[in-house]
Every structure is written in C-alpha cells, then in structure tokens.
C-alpha cells in the first residue's frame, strides 16, 4: 500500500504548457514592439512629443495581465463553479451578471469615441471596454452550463436554455459593437457545436445567426450597409480611405518588407495604425514572410490550446479551452480578413498585438485559464 | 486522481474528471468527449483553411498587387519638387551672350509647417518689401503651399534662408536675363513667367532652349511634412540647348546707334535696319528702333500716362512695341524695287545696256499721266543712266516691255510672292495685285515700286539673289544648336534656291548698282576706297495726300562680290525726306564702321586712281 502510494506520487508529475506560455509571451512582446513602431509618430504629434505614450500604457497593462495570467494559471479553474459564500450563486454566474450590468451601463453612461459608446471611464486609470470582459464571461457561462448538463445540447430545449442568457448579452453588445457581437456569436456557435452531438443544431444556429446578422445590417444603422459598399469598391469609394491605406501598406511591403520601423503608411496615412490596422503595418515593415511568420505563431498557439482542450481533465476545462480557442482564432481571422479587405470592415483587434489594454488583459486572463487547465492534466 | 499522466496526446481517450461524482455519467462524458475531439478538429481545420486562404490573399496583395497599390502608395507618400532646368542661352556669332539666366529664388510658405506666423510675416514683409496685408493673407491661408514672391534676388533669398524659419521654402529658379537689354530686343524676344518664349527667337527656338526640369521626390507624412534623413529620389534637370545665332553684337550695335541717331534727327516714327550676308542669308543685324528693354518687356517705352490706359489699350501698345516691323510690316518699296524690275527686264531680254531712253518728265499710260520725280525730265539717257537717275519713265518703259507675265514670273523667282522663311515668328507676306487684274497703269506703277506692298526682308532677300550671283537664300539667325556640354552640335541648314537668275544678269546689276552709288542718286553712300552698290527710295505712304514718306536705301559692299547687304528704312522723317539724302548717308556711316570690322579692305590706291576727277 505504502509502496503503491509512493509510486503514485512519482507518477504525479504536474504538467504545465510552457510552450504555450512562451508563445503568449512572444506575441505580447512582439505586439509591444509593433505598437511602438506604429504609434511613435502619432504619439509624438498628439501626445506632446511622448513617443512612448502608447507603448508605456500597453506595456504596463501587459505586465499586469501577465502577472494575472500566471496567478490564474496556478489556481484551479474550477473555483468559478463554487457558489459565492452564503449564497447559492456560482462565481461564474456572478461574473456573467457583472458583464451584463456593465454592458448595460456602458449603453447609457459610456464614453463615446468615433461615434460608438463602448468605453467606461475609469478616471486616471483610463478606460475600460466591457465588451472584452463579456467575451470571457460568455465563454465561462457556456462552459458552465454545458458542464452542468452535458447532454442538454442534444435537444432544442437544452440549446434554448443556453442561447437565451447568452443572447441577452449578445444583444446588449450588438447595439454598439457589431464586431464584438460577431465574435461572441461565433463563440456561442462553435461552443455549442463542440458540445452537441447533433449537427443540425449547429446548422440551425448558423442560419439563425446569419439571418439575424443580415437583418441587423439591413435594418440597423446605415453605416453598416455602407461598409459593404466600401468593401466592394474600396478604391473608388470616398470612405474607403482607411482600408485602402491599409492595402497600400500591405502592397508596399513586398516579400521581406521595408524593415522594422521603416513603414511610411504609419506616418498618418493609416489612421490609428496601432489599433485594428496594425497587421497592415506588420506586412509593410516585415513583408510577406514576416506576416506569414506571425500567422504561423498564431497557428502554433491554436494548436497548443487545441491540445489542452482535447486533453482537459474535465468537460468544463475542455469547454473553456475550446471557447478561448474560438475567441482568439475568430479575432485573428476576422482581423486579417478585414485588413486585407477580404470581408467588409469591422473593428476587430488582432489578439495580443493590437493596442488596447482591456483586450490584452482579458486575453491574458483567458490564457491563464487555459494554462490552469493544462496544469491539471496528469 | 484515478488516471495517470499521459503526455500531451493520450493514447486512450481517458479524461475522467476526478471529482466527477455522478458515476452514471462517466460513460456519457466519455462519449461526449470523443465527439468533442472530432468537432474540435473539424473546427480547427476550418480555421486553418481560412488562414491559408488569407495567406493566399496576402500573397496576392503583396506580390501581384504590389505594382498597383505599391505604386499608388508611393504616389501619395511622395511630394514632387521640381528643379528648374536652366534655359539654353543665346549667343551671337562670336560667342557673346545675348540671352542668359541669372539664379533667382521663389519664396513660398507651407501653412502647417509655419510655427511662428507673426515672425514669418514680419521678416517677409521687411526683406521682400511687400505689403503687410498681402503677406499676412498668404501666410495665414490654409493651403498646402502658398507662393509669396518669385524672381527674388539670390542675395535676398539667402538672407531669408539664414533666418531658418519653419515653413518658409526658398526654391532656386532661373530668370531670363539679357545682358544687352534693348539690343535686338525684337529679334531675340523675351520669356514669360514660366520661362517660355513670348516673341522672337525665344519663341522660334523655344523647344530647343527649354531644358528638362528635374524632380526631387521627397517622402512626406500624411500631413505633408517632409521626412528628413531619408534617401530621396532625384532626377537631375537637363539644361536647355544653346542657340548660336548669326547676329553680331558689334554690327548690331553700330546699326542701332546709327538708326537711333537718324531717328532723333529726323524725328522719325521708326527706323529699321537689316544687315546680312547676301551669300548665305546670315543676318548680322536687325534693328527696329525704338527697341524695348527685354529685361522689362512689359514697360511701355516712350509712353506717358500709362496709368490711364485700359488693359486692352495697354495690351495693344505692348504688342505694337514688341512687333518686329522688319519682317511683320509691309510697305511700298518705291525706287529700291527698280532693282527687281531691271533684273526681270534683263533676264527676259527686254532691255540691254545699249538701249537708250528719253524722259520728258512723265509717261502717258493709257489715259493717265504718270510723272517722274524730276518733273522737268531727265532727257535722253541710257539704261544705266536711267537707273542712276532712278528715272520712272525708263522703268515704266522696261516694265511694259517685260509685261505682266514676265514681271510676275520674276516676282515669283525672286521670292516676293512667298514668305522668306526666316526663323522668327510673325512674318508677313507681300500684298500684290492679282495677276489678272493688272492693267497697264498697275504695271507701270509696279515697275517703280508702287501699288503693292512687301516686307523689307522680302526685298533684301530678292536683292541678295540679284547680287550674289543668282541664289535665292533664306535669311536667318539660327546657325547652330549645342547642348550644354557641347557633346551634341546641330548645324542648322536653310533652303537655298540655286540659280534663281543668271550670273550675267547678276554681274550687270552689280555694276549698275555700283554706278548708282559712285555717280548716281546713291552717291551719299559712297565711301572712299570701297566699291559699294545700292539704290535709294522715297516711298510716299498711303494715303498719298498725307505727305508721309518712307525713305530707304539698300546697299552692298564690295560691289563686285558682296559680303554685306544692308537695308535701312526711315519711317515718316520730318523735313527732307529723300532716301538718297537722308537714308544713304546713314548706311554709309554703318558701312564705314562695319566694313573694316568684317575684314573688307579699303582699296586706297587703285580706287583713288580710278575714280574720275
């Protein structure tokens, strides 16, 4: 008995996906370099000559995010399933409710930038974008519900019980933020697809989502229709500027690029080059090979998350990792597709690389969860 | 903790959750898990497929669209700044610069680069001596680039440069400069603000003189701020070709001075002089006194109260001032045209030196009496004396003999019915009767140079053919065109119509015209030691009652082998207006100066001895 116990202790080697950690750190580091490269010009002009303005902010939040990620990765991700002390509500539901509240709050009291109310002011700390939190909350919520009733998604009733709470948040997001709504919709769709044994739910959902999306574009604000016009006539449409300038940047990169820091298009031609359009500047500075290299790093990231998802010690962990995978992958694909004008433009950040404190912190927290799941693999 | 560590990819699908308490669900979870794996793989494959498509899209954009979008990108990123090419220079036959360029600068401001507008305005107002309001308006105007002043002297521009003002651009440029300002101004012409030729040789050779502007491509930010320390693409300017002309500054200067003097003395409207080489048509001098200042071509000369003029009036006056009357204005040549009539008659064999005539002071033509200028008549005279006396009845007689067809044939042969083809713009053609409308009266008046109009240049061209042995040359200025480093030289060639008339007639005419100067009506052009041929004329301007005249003289030297042919016209002289009295001495004065200069020796001894009395 004692011998067996000893043997068991020896076998109990704890796994931790250092490869994934390395990839994440690489992407964050690379993102900081590119943010500095793309933003120093506009920072010098708009931020009183402080060329490091954006780098410093993003760097600070990335550091906080990395610390948070490491802490979360050492925690047992299943604590979110536990009820809040003296109540019966699990933490995950609480997080979800917070996201709903913030998402509602931002609709009324949010800060409006570029015609969209998406940010909550935090005074000197800057701004907070609740839609980033919402993505994580949706992943947690779906994983939680699937975990509670693993077979629920085999029936329409079970699907509806998941779709309704997620749908509420999705609607709240969609009012001001089409791109996040698309990402959340994709998360919902793919997580249900993974958890269900019936394919027709997936098809139904895809059709419903597509139909709702089309209605949203047709009945919603005029600029969404206009974006389709821009997409089709990027060179002639008067508002094609940003995308067209991005294409200029991409096309002037050539095979090996102009060299780091040598982009011309970031000098005011591509507006806010450090944000959603950052990939076009990566193409210009590092060329086709640089861009492919970054895409390969993302593929490697997906692969690691996939492995952890498939080997997760429980259904909850597996669903969490699947959700994170869908989240990161859909943003990468959407971002590159928008920048290359493959689809109508929508503002999706390139994960880990685009400027945006909330986005990078939430992503790192999600990675912390994935690492935590990997840490439970025996 | 029921299961063991299974590396990254477990061999068996065992993923049991340790604290999963409901044993009955274990099977279901396992079942679901297998599904998860398959679906996860399908999903990741879909993602990878999309990523590969996006890579394809990227390749398409970066490789196959690089020429399209890449070039468009370069276009928006670069600002082109042109470097002005220096315009080709114009030289006289001895390599003296008639038109060159001096470096000047253009001062402009770039609105969004100006940091201290007040200081900029103050300095520009002070240094450029401009109106404060004007400068202020331009500096504060929101435009990408606003020109403040062009043609700023280089010293002033350099001074502005030393202030090192942000947003103030000093661009080098060239301004056309004429070292002799008024000399041959109507021939050389001048250029406009873009260095393009406006009149004269500057227009005729504009394409050759204009260089190719260079370009500096500077990279700029979206706001148009130039990026420093970046290698700029550059296309060097190519200066224009230089033009070498047949003009001779000294001959031009002599002729001009003489013209100025006689114009002043006679208070004439204008004086025109053409001096050329009758052998090849090279024009040494072409004077249209009064000349204008080519460095200030828009300043009216001899005009008071220019402020009161309307724009149109001023424009008309400017055009008149710039007009090269030697080639653009026609006139009735008068007696100088008798050279042509005599040539035609000799060629047609209608007159010989042996023929004798009688002048009663008039000739009856049909029902008209046409008078000789000597109303009492010249009496009996030979053909030679007829020319020397410039006797109208003699020429009416030989004109009649030659007939309309004979006369018109020789007008044509001597180039009087066509433009000369001179290499400056604005040439006029002759105004002649239609051949079928010419009656006896018209023929009679034409034979002594009335009732039709030609340009002085047409006359001098015809006379060139008469005295050079019969070749109808094309009078011209341009001799050769050279690029700046003299690696490409193009000699200009002109049409010559050989043997327009016979050598014999030419010899006869030279002899006759020499006699006119030596003993006849052109004797005031005689210079001791030189053989000079010529013919005078006094043309009454239309309408005849106005009593306005053009006195002229056409002369050449040496008479036996002319190297210099000159025509001088005094338009509306006051007082004595006879060509032989006032025009011939002026040509004589010009010849006195230029004959030794062009290397025609004075033949003292032989001439002194030969000359009777």
Image: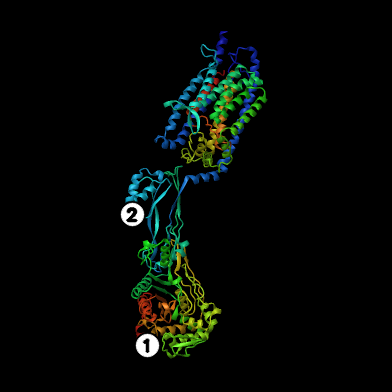
- Residue extending farthest to the top is A1
Single out the residue that lies furthest toward the left.
B126
Considering only vertical position in the picture, is B116 above or below A366?
Answer: below
Q: Check the image and report above or below for B608 versus B485.
A: below
Can you identify the residue that label 2 sits on? Answer: B155
Chain under disc 1: B
Occupied quadrant, residue B275 = bottom left
Secondary structure beneath label 2: helix
Q: Which mark is residue B610?
A: 1
Q: Secondary structure at mark 1?
A: helix
Q: Nearer the viewer, residue B353 or B471?
A: B353
The residue nearer to you, when weighing B120 against B366, is: B366
| Disc sitting over residue A287 in the figure | none
The crowd level at tag 1 (other Cα within 10 Å; few <14, some 14-19, many 20+) is: few
Which residue occupies the foreground of this view, B306 or A273? B306
Q: Chain of mark 2?
A: B
Q: Is residue B189 visible?
A: no
Q: Image height check: is A239 above or below B257?
A: above
Q: Is residue A60 above or below residue B87?
A: above
Give the image location of residue A249, x and y in percent: 51, 40
> Residue B212 in the image: x percent, y percent?
46, 57
Q: Position of residue B163 (x, y in %)?
A: 33, 47
Between B12 and B382, which is closer to the camera in this rendering?
Answer: B382
């Amino acid at each position: 008995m004692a011998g067996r116990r000893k043997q068991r202790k020896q076998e109990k080697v704890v796994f931790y996906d250092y490869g994934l950690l390395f990839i994440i750190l690489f992407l964050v580091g690379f993102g900081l370099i590119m943010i500095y490269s793309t933003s120093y010009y506009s920072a010098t002009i708009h931020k009183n000559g402080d060329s490091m303005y954006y780098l410093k902010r993003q760097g600070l939040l990335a550091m906080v995010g990395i610390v948070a990620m490491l802490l979360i990765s050492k925690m047992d991700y299943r604590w979110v399933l536990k009820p809040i002390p003296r109540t019966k509500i699990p933490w995950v539901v609480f997080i979800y409710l917070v996201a709903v509240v913030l998402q509602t709050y931002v609709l009324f009291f949010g800060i409006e930038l570029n015609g969209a109310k998406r940010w909550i002011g935090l005074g000197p700390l800057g701004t907070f974008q609740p839609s980033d939190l919402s993505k994580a909350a949706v992943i947690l919520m779906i994983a939680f519900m699937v975990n509670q009733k693993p077979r629920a998604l085999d029936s329409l009733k079970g699907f509806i019980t998941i779709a309704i709470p997620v749908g509420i948040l999705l609607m709240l997001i969609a009012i001001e933020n089409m791109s996040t709504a698309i990402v959340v919709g994709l998360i919902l769709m793919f997580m249900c697809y993974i958890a269900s044994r019936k394919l027709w739910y997936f098809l139904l959902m895809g059709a419903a989502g597509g139909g709702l999306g089309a209605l949203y574009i047709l009945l919603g604000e005029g600029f969404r229709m206009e974006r389709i016009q821009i997409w089709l006539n990027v060179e002639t449409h008067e508002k094609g500027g940003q995308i067209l300038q991005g294409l200029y940047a991409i096309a002037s990169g050539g095979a090996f690029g102009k060299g780091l820091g040598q982009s011309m298009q970031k000098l005011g031609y591509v507006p806010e080059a450090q944000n959603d359009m950052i990939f076009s500047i990566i193409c210009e500075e590092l060329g086709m090979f640089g861009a492919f290299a970054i895409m390969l790093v993302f593929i490697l990231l997906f692969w690691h998350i996939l492995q952890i998802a498939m080997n997760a010690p429980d259904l909850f962990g597996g669903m969490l990792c699947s959700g994170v995978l869908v989240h990161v992958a859909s943003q990468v694909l959407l971002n590159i597709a928008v920048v290359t004008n493959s689809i109508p433009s929508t503002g999706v950040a390139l994960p880990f690389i685009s400027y945006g404190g909330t986005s990078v912190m939430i992503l790192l927290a999600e990675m912390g969860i994935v690492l935590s799941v990997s840490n439970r693999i025996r | 903790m029921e299961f063991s560590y299974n590396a990254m990819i477990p061999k068996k699908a065992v993923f049991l959750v340790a604290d999963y308490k409901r044993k009955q669900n274990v099977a279901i979870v396992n079942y679901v898990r297998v599904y998860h794996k398959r679906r996860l793989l399908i999903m990741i494959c879909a993602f990878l497929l999309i990523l590969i498509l996006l890579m394809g899209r990227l390749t398409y954009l970066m490789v196959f669209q690089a020429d399209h979008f890449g070039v468009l990108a370069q276009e928006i990123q670069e600002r082109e700044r042109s470097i002005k090419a220096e315009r080709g220079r114009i030289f006289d036959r001895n390599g003296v610069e008639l038109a060159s360029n001096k470096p000047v600068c253009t001062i402009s401001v770039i609105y969004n680069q100006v940091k201290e507008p007040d200081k900029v305005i103050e300095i520009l107002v002070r240094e450029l001596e401009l109106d404060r309001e004007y400068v202020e308006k331009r500096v504060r105007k929101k435009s990408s680039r606003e020109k403040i002043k062009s043609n700023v002297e280089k010293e002033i521009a350099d001074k502005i440069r030393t202030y090192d003002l942000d947003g103030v651009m000093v661009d080098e440029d060239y301004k056309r400069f004429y070292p002799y300002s008024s000399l041959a101004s109507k021939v050389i012409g001048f250029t406009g603000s873009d260095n393009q030729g406006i009149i004269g040789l500057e227009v005729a050779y504009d394409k050759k003189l204009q260089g190719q502007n260079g370009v500096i491509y500077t990279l700029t930010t979206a706001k148009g701020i130039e990026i420093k320390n970046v290698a700029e693409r550059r296309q060097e300017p190519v200066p224009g070709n230089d033009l070498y002309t047949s003009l001779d500054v000294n001959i031009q200067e002599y002729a001009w001075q003489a013209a100025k003097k006689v114009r002043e003395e006679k208070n004439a409207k204008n004086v025109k002089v053409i001096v050329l080489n009758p052998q090849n048509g090279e024009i040494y001098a072409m004077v249209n006194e009064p000349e204008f200042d080519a460095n200030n071509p828009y300043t009216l000369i001899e005009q008071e109260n220019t402020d009161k003029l309307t724009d149109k009036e001023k424009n008309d006056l400017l055009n008149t001032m710039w007009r090269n009357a030697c080639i653009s204005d026609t006139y009735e040549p008068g007696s100088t045209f008798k050279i042509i009539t005599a040539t035609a008659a000799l060629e047609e064999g209608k007159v010989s030196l042996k023929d004798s005539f009688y002048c009663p002071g008039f000739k009856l033509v049909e029902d008209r009496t046409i008078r000789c200028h000597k109303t009492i008549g010249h009496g009996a005279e030979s053909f030679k004396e007829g020319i020397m006396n410039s006797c109208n009845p003699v020429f009416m007689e030989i004109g009649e003999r030659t007939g309309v067809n004979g006369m018109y044939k020789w007008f044509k042969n001597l180039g009087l019915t066509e433009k000369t083809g001179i290499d400056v713009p604005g040439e006029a053609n002759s105004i002649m009767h239609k051949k079928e409308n010419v009656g006896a009266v018209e023929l009679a008046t034409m034979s002594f140079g009335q009732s039709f109009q030609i340009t002085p240049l047409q006359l001098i061209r015809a006379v060139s053919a008469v005295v050079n042995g019969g070749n109808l040359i094309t009078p011209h200025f341009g001799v050769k065109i050279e690029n700046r480093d003299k690696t490409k030289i193009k000699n200009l060639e002109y049409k010559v119509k050989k043997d327009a008339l016979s050598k014999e007639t030419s010899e006869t005419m030279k002899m006759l015209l020499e006699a006119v100067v030596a003993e006849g009506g052109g004797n005031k052009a005689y210079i001791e030691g030189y053989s000079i041929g010529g013919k005078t004329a006094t043309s009454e301007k239309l309408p005849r009652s106005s009593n306005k005249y053009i006195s002229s003289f056409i002369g050449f030297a040496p008479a036996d082998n002319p190297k210099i042919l000159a025509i001088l016209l005094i338009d509306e002289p006051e007082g004595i207006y006879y060509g032989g009295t006032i025009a011939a001495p002026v040509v004589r004065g010009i010849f006195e100066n230029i004959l030794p200069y062009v290397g025609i020796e004075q033949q003292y001894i032989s001439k002194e001895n030969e000359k009777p009395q």
